[in-house]
Image (cartoon, rainbow, N blue to C red):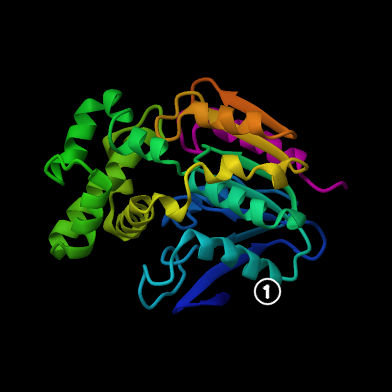
Amino acid sequence: MPYLDVGYGHQLHYESVGDITTDVPLLFVHGGPGAGVSTADKALFAGLQRPVVYFDQRGCGLSRFEQRLNGNTTEQLVEDIEKLRNALSLPKLILVGGSWGSTLSLLYAVRYPQYIDSMLLWGIFLCRQQELDWFYQHGASQLYPEEFQKFMCQVDGAADSVAAYFDLLTTGSEEQQRAAAASWARWEAVNSFFDTDEATLGRFAQAESALPMALLESYYFKHQGFLPADYILRHCQPLQTISVDIVQGRLDTICPCGTAWQLAKHLANCRLYISPRASHAASEPENFSALRTLLHKLEPAA
């Protein structure tokens, strides 16, 4: 397995599919932070002719680390993409990412617009405090009150649920950490799909995937993503010449549609496609269909 040493004891796992020397590759930027690249993620790219590069961000997936949170900030994740681009000698990238993957893609493009061919994003998340408050305090709670009550029970109704979860995930007993991670992951899964079932929610709550995601998300979100207020919207100028396609679920209760609409209004070369009956996940049928259509439009000429 190929790994890239990025410092602070972190080695990123990456994988390329297809010949990255012949065409501008798609670089998949996964969500979370901490979700890692999954089999479901790869299904989105099945059968494409354009090469694809996958990588697991610091502290998750198949990437190696000495301490998961040490040297793990948004700035460092952005620079990791640049280190990977350099290591693979790629002149240009097509960034593809959703949710936190859209955040990181936009931040990289703001910093390094000269290396971006185009972007395909979904579930737009700008990591602003108002978005975090919507999902972890008061907003989505009004749509799934019974599930939000379960989520809050883990931290005894703490005023700052994100900070309380982070404390529990870092100082609690092993049993408490596993229970907190399962609860955190369940709340996210409930909101990821328009229609789901207990079996799906149970898969999301499995400790192997739930623990790194819950820990990294609560860590990042406790620090507002290590970003100044409204950073992306205030730094959109480098993005004006980049072609950006956005697929957004109308019924997305994690990253509400208004954020995607607001970003699209700030970009000169952006097209927003709203899926009327889809929630957050790329695997939602309407989101998946729209993303596949757009990916096929990015295929290299025969």
Q: On the rendered structure, is 150 left or right of 229?
A: left
Secondary structure category for the residue under label 1: helix
Residue 131 is situated, as x and y percent measured from the top left of the image, at 41, 36
The residue at 40%/30% (across/down) is 253
Highlighted range, magenta: 279-302
Q: Quadrant of residue 23?
A: bottom right
- Residue 109 location in percent, x, y? 66, 52
Q: Is residue 63 above or below residue 129?
A: below
Q: Which residue is drawn at the image coordinates 45% and 68% (left, top)? A: 62
Of 270 and 207, nearer the camera is 270
Residue under numbered circle 1: 87
Q: Nearer the viewer, residue 122 or 263?
A: 263
- Count of marks overlaid on the render: 1
In the image, what residue occupies the spot 61% across and 48% down? 106
Q: Quadrant of residue 128?
A: top left
Q: For the view shown, which residue lies furthest in the right direction? A: 302
Q: Residue at (23%, 44%) from the top-left corner?
A: 161
In what quadrant of the picture does the N terminus appear? bottom right
Residue 195: in magenta span:
no
Horizontally, is 229 left or right of 260 in the view?
left
Where residue 173 appears, x then y in whole percent? 13, 64
